[in-house]
Image: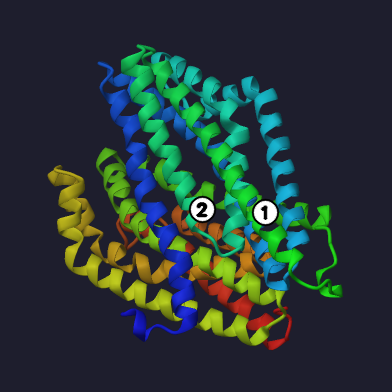
């Protein structure tokens, strides 16, 4: 599709989505550096310890994803309403929440570590190194959570270039520092954690510099405009903040529960199934890298239309997003249908794993189709700042997943692997269908805005 064939709205969607997609693809690739460094320390235990330590930190940070999502939706509405003061207050409150959560995590780091280590259950040598990694990197929590809030603020203002620049910059700094501290100064495994910590704080400083530049530009623009009642300063209500963030937190917990169950059940089905599931999950993650970009565009554009009280723009944006999502889903459907075997061969050389993935080809091919609506409507509802439907529909979809996984008889028509992927894709499909139903209901009752 050429630039000339895109509508102005389509170009705005692409302009917002593209940097986010680039960020989603490049950051994991750059992040492989820590893995490579740990893998060259002479003992596999270092690689396992870094994997465990990173996973424990990611549990904390992933559950705090509401800082980005809640901030982007509210900021987009303030941006649409032309209320710069409200947008600044939203960022201020988001950073305050990030600071409070970070302080709590640091103060409670010892019992938090004990709980996470008990959940992971790593062996003694790996556990000792993972604990060291965690206890160093936890001091980067204020930086990580602060960057989430700043990222959400910029996305809400339809700027995904700054979050992309900061995220890629953090990973580049992490690469340089890890190599320097581990091999140059000779800190060994501790150098990996120290490099990650320093890179995170560098990223926060850079993010706040971008914020300062943006706020200065806002001040210059405001000075040139006549004062109107529409532009009188407003404050974001703490009650709304906590309500939105609570819904998003419990939604994230439901999603994490499903992800952990996929891993746990796959492990019980055997090493081959576990490995095959990991390969298939890469197909899902690669599609999600693209769809997350369009979800960000939905947050920004739908939120702006809602803040401006422009129902026509809102409906047009939703239609355009759904069309774009459908086109992407079809493209990935054909890629996975014809190329799943080739892609699997690139990911693993195990004949058993390849054969297992091949036996699940239907579920690999169906992934884009069943998940596309969930991504788009997630972004739409975040932009509308209607987070309760996000939590409720995700909880219902998660219940469907667990019902299919644990209540169908093991000796049924479907093999165990197929039953597990049937449950996961039913969960994804249910999220999209339920959110679409809520959206249609709100639209019919004129309750969208």
Residue 11: x, y in percent? 44, 76
Above or below, 225 relative to 401? below
Q: From the viewer's perspective, is 25 left or right of 299? A: left
Q: Nearer the viewer, mark 1 or mark 2?
A: 1
Above or below, 390 relative to 197? below
Which residue lies at the image location 46% right of the left edge and 59% below the top edge? Answer: 404
Residue 333: x, y in percent? 29, 71
Q: Nearer the viewer, residue 206 or 349?
A: 206
Q: Quickly name the residue at label 2.
A: 162
Q: Tag 2 or tag 1, which sits nearer the N-term? A: 2
Q: Quickly name the residue at label 1.
A: 216
Q: Could you tell me which quadrant the C terminus lies in?
A: bottom right
Which residue lies at the image location 57% right of the left edge and 51% below the top edge? Answer: 151
Q: Nearer the viewer, residue 76 or 126?
A: 76
Q: From the viewer's perspective, is 13 left or right of 236? A: left
Q: Residues within 10 Å of mark 1 (few under 14, many from 20)?
A: few
Tell me, what colour scheme is on the image? Answer: rainbow
Which residue lies at the image location 18% right of the left edge and 44% below the top edge? Answer: 348
Which residue lies at the image location 71% right of the left edge and 48% below the top edge? Answer: 94
Above or below, 342 relative to 33? below
Name the quadrant containing residue 236. bottom right
Q: Secondary structure at mark 2?
A: helix
Residue furthest to the front: 224
Residue 244: x, y in percent? 72, 57
Q: Nearer the viewer, residue 121 or 233?
A: 233
Name the quadrant containing residue 364. bottom left
Q: From the viewer's perspective, is 271 left or right of 405? A: left
Q: Secondary structure at mark 1?
A: helix
CA separation, marks 1 and 2? 16 Å
Look at the image and tell me whether residue 253 can be seen: no
């Amino acid at each position: 599709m050429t630039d000339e064939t895109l509508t102005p709205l389509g170009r705005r969607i692409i302009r917002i989505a593209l940097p986010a997609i680039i960020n989603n693809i490049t950051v994991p690739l750059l992040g492989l550096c820590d893995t490579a460094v740990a893998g060259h320390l002479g003992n596999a235990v270092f690689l396992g310890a870094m994997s465990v330590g990173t996973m424990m930190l990611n549990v904390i940070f992933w559950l705090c994803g509401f800082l980005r999502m809640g901030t982007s939706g509210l900021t987009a509405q303030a941006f649409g309403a032309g209320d710069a003061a409200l947008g600044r207050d939203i960022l201020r409150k988001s950073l305050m929440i990030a600071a409070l959560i970070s302080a709590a995590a640091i103060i409670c780091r010892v019992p938090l570590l004990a709980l996470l280590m008990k959940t992971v259950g790593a062996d003694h040598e790996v556990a000792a190194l993972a604990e060291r990694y965690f206890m160093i990197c936890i001091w980067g929590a204020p930086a990580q959570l602060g960057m989430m809030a700043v990222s959400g603020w910029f996305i809400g203002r339809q700027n995904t270039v700054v979050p992309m620049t900061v995220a890629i910059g953090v990973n580049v700094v992490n690469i340089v520092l890890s190599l320097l501290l581990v091999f140059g100064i000779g800190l060994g495994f501790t150098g990996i954690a120290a490099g990650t910590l320093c890179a995170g704080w560098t990223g926060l400083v850079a993010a706040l510099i971008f914020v300062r530049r943006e706020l200065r530009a806002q001040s210059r623009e405001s000075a040139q405009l006549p004062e109107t009642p529409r532009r009188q300063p407003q404050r974001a209500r703490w009650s709304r903040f906590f309500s939105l963030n609570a819904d998003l937190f419990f939604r994230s917990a439901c999603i994490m529960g499903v992800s952990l169950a996929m891993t746990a059940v796959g492990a019980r089905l055997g090493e081959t199934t576990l490995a095959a599931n990991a390969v298939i999950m890469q197909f899902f993650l690669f599609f999600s890298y693209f769809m997350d970009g369009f979800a960000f565009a939905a947050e920004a554009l739908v939120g702006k239309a809602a803040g401006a009280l422009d129902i026509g723009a809102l409906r047009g944006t939703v239609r355009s997003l759904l069309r774009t999502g459908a086109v992407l889903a079809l493209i990935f459907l054909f890629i996975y249908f014809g190329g799943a075997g080739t892609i699997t061969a690139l990911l693993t050389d195990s004949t058993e794993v390849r054969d297992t993935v091949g036996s699940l080809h239907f579920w690999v091919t169906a992934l884009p189709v069943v998940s596309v609506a969930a991504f788009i409507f997630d972004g739409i509802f975040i932009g509308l700042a209607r987070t309760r439907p996000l939590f409720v529909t995700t909880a219902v979809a998660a219940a469907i997943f667990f019902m299919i996984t644990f209540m169908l008889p093991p000796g049924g028509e479907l093999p165990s692997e197929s039953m597990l992927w049937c449950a996961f894709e039913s969960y994804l499909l249910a999220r999209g269908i339920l959110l679409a139903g809520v959206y249609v209901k709100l639209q019919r009752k004129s309750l969208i805005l």
